[in-house]
Image: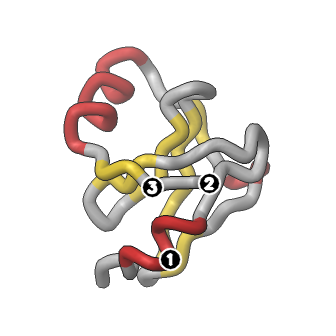
Amino acid sequence: MAIDSTLLSILACPQDKGPLLLVGDEVLYNPRLRRAYPIENGIPVLLIDEAREVADAEHEDYVARGIASSVD
């Protein structure tokens, strides 16, 4: 289940309030903090405690595959 583009445009990282990258239908990724937030059953889980740290190789993959959200 894909995240709607309108929803993606208003989503932000709960920690630094910056934009996130949508990577497939699996995670929302903050490349500044290298934190990945899971998407469960099409619903983003944007809780700081649920995010996980991302290693260098995974970071490069996420940045290459991610679709940016826009936070104004």
Q: Amino acid at mark 3?
A: Ser
- Name the mark on residue 72: 2
- Name the mark on residue 69: 3
Q: Residues within 10 Å of mark 1 (few under 14, many from 20)?
A: few
- Name the mark on residue 7: 1
Q: Amino acid at mark 2?
A: Asp
Residue contact between numbered discs 3 and 1, judged by CB atoms under 8 Å: no
Q: Residues within 10 Å of mark 2 (few under 14, many from 20)?
A: few
Image quadrant occupied by the C terminus: bottom right
Residue at the (48%, 44%) spot, across then down: 29
Q: How is the image coloured?
A: secondary structure
Kindly report which numbered mark, 1 or 2, lies closer to the viewer in this rendering.
2
Residue at the (64%, 55%) spot, across then down: 12
- Name the mark on residue 65: none
Is 65 in front, or is 47?
A: 65
Which residue occupies the extreme top position in the image? 56
Rendered view: 38 above or below 34: below
Q: Secondary structure at mark 3?
A: loop
